[in-house]
Image: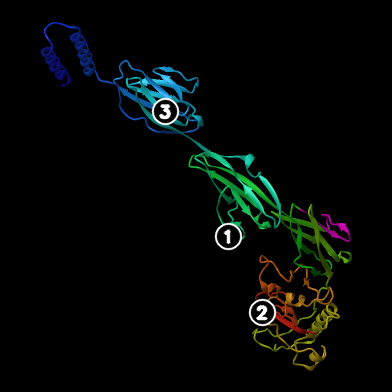
């Protein structure tokens, strides 16, 4: 179409100008010849735009430039942000060896090897036509997050209890990383003591009036959508002087038996813990067995005294000591006599109901003897305590005359039916008036004003303010089966009550 148009223009020109050749006509013909040549040939053009490319730092990237009908023209690549000519045609101009160029099927491919952050920016593909034609593409170089240790809190940090601390975590990367905090053990983080969260956002984690419960490992996690995410583990140590809690300050046991006493301690930094008796440190031996169980800043220390003798009774001290201070707890081990064992068969009636206030029973002389032994033992234990025993009565007058005239028949309340030993020990005054302790035959029994949750139920620690009891178990043959314990199946229990004054 363009050629026909050009021929028509030439014919018009010949009709206009005279038949003779002039310089003016020659110049016009030359111009028209160039015009026809230009029209008959296609100019270079871009077949497709340069795509925007995203690459992680250190990886290779390729930028394509597709040019059709290039002819004798040249293609050049330019990094606009650096104002740097990278390649011209097949030659690399830049002195950066990471750049290279290849040509296949009208495509001029710019290679960026092991991309750096400096390679980020706009790239221009240019053809040296007149006027020049060009197009632009963008290379995005992303960087995974990296935690800056020099600007962050060290991997281990210590603070005194009830003080404030800010833990910092800085990270770089592209795009800018997001910082979150969480505890390694999955517990909540107390923020400003009013709000508890599982995850906290921000470079700085503020902790106010830190308690020992907040001690542990904290994770600072940085992420920006470019894998991999990174984290830093920061251990928070909360320092405080030792504390000791003694479950049983009074422990009684008969001579010849084993007894175990224990203390609970909390301290950080880690404390030195040991036992002292008569101003001498107790060491493991045939006489003593020590056991220490540690969990974080808590420790549970036990001391077992084997084959108790006269010289083993007295005050034992559990001691806990660290760089911030020292504390100790005291436990008194005292002797209690074993109950006497009857030599003859005992006849009695089984208790049928806890609600009954009277125990109907028939006792022979052996029963009277047994009661007398029991009363004598209890009087030895509670001399001066102001307690008066109340024994079960008998249908015979002789049974009544064998006990104190103040004794009265009573039944153990149902709430203490299975805990007669604890009830009896609650009134023990081995340590003087008002002392708290536990009475045990053959082993230690817990007694405490405020027992921990992990120690049995509250019923084990229950005592009665104004009464206590002493119980004996009998088997089906009416033989003595035990003292102050829970009677086995098929056996019965009989209890004597006394009132505290």
Q: Name the residue at 66% across, 71% down.
A: 457
Q: Quadrant of residue 379?
A: bottom right
Q: Which residues are magenta?
A: 271-286
Q: Name the residue at 65% across, 48% down.
A: 235
Question: Disc 1 to disc 2, how far (Cα)?
Answer: 43 Å
Left or right of 129: which side holds 79?
right
Which of disc 2 and disc 1 is earlier in sequence? Answer: 1
What element does badge 1 sit on? strand
Considering only vertical position in the picture, is 55 above or below 302? above
Looking at the picture, how far across and down is residue 425, in whole percent? 77, 75
3 or 1: mark nearer the eye: 3
Question: Disc 3 to disc 1, how far (Cα)?
Answer: 51 Å
Question: Disc 2 to disc 3, how far (Cα)?
Answer: 89 Å
Quadrant for the N terminus, please.
top left
Label 1 crowding class (10 Å Cα cut-off): few <14, some 14-19, many 20+?
few
Q: Quadrant of residue 281?
A: bottom right
Residue ranking furthest to the bottom: 397
What's the colour scheme?
rainbow
Instruction: Identify the residue under disc 1.
Output: 195
Label 2 crowding class (10 Å Cα cut-off): few <14, some 14-19, many 20+?
few
2 or 3: mark nearer the eye: 3
Looking at the picture, how far across and down is residue 119, in whole percent? 48, 29
Left or right of 95: which side holds 168?
right
Seen from the viewer's position, the closer of residues 230 and 17 is 17
The answer to if 270 sits in the magenta stretch is: no
Numbered disc total: 3
Q: Name the residue at 89% across, 61% down.
A: 278
Considering only vertical position in the picture, is 178 above or below 135? below
Instruction: Identify the residue under disc 2.
Output: 415
1 or 2: mark nearer the eye: 1
């Amino acid at each position: 179409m363009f050629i026909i148009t050009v021929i028509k223009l030439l014919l018009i020109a010949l009709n206009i100008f005279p038949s003779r050749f002039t310089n003016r006509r020659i110049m016009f013909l030359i111009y028209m010849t160039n015009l026809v040549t230009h029209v008959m040939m296609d100019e270079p053009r871009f077949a497709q735009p340069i795509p925007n490319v995203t690459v992680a730092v250190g990886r290779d990237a390729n930028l394509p430039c597709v040019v059709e009908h290039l002819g004798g023209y040249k293609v050049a690549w330019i990094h606009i942000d650096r104002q740097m000519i990278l390649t011209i045609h097949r030659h690399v101009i830049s002195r950066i060896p990471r750049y290279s160029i290849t040509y296949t099927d009208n495509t001029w491919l710019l290679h960026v090897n092991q991309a750096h952050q400096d390679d980020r920016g706009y790239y221009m593909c240019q053809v040296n036509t007149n006027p020049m034609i060009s197009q632009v593409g963008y290379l995005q170089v992303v960087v995974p997050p990296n935690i800056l240790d020099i600007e962050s809190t060290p991997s281990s940090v210590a603070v005194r209890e009830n003080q404030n601390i800010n833990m910092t975590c800085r990270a770089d990367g592209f795009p800018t990383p997001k910082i979150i905090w969480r505890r390694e053990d999955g517990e909540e983080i107390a923020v400003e003591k009013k709000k508890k969260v599982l995850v906290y956002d921000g470079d700085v984690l503020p902790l106010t009036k830190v308690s020992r419960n907040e001690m542990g490992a904290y994770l600072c996690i940085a992420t920006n959508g470019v894998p991999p995410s990174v984290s830093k583990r920061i251990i928070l140590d909360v320092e405080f002087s030792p504390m000791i809690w003694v479950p049983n300050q009074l422990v009684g046991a008969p001579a010849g038996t084993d007894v175990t006493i224990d203390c609970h301690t909390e301290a950080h930094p880690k404390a030195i813990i040991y036992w002292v008796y008569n101003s001498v440190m107790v060491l493991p031996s045939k006489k003593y067995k020590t056991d220490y169980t540690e969990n974080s800043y808590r420790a549970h220390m036990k001391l077992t005294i084997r084959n108790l003798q006269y010289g083993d009774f007295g005050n034992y001290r559990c001691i806990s000591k660290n760089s911030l201070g020292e504390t100790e707890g005291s436990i008194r081990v005292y002797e209690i006599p074993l109950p006497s064992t009857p030599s003859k068969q005992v006849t009695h009636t089984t208790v049928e109901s806890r609600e009954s206030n009277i125990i109907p029973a028939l006792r022979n002389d052996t029963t009277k003897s047994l009661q007398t032994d029991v009363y004598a033992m209890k009087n030895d234990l509670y001399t001066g305590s102001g307690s008066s025993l109340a024994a079960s009565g008998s249908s015979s007058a002789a049974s009544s005359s064998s006990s104190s005239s103040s004794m009265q028949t009573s039944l153990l309340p149902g709430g203490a039916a299975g805990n007669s030993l604890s009830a009896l020990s609650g009134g023990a005054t081995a340590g003087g008036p008002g002392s708290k302790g536990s009475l045990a035959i053959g082993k230690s029994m817990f007694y405490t004003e405020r027992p921990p949750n992990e120690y049995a139920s509250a019923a084990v620690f229950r005592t009665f303010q104004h009464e206590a009891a002493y119980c004996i178990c009998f088997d089906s043959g009416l033989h003595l089966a035990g003292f102050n314990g829970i009677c086995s199946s098929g056996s019965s229990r009989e209890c004597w009550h006394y009132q505290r004054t």
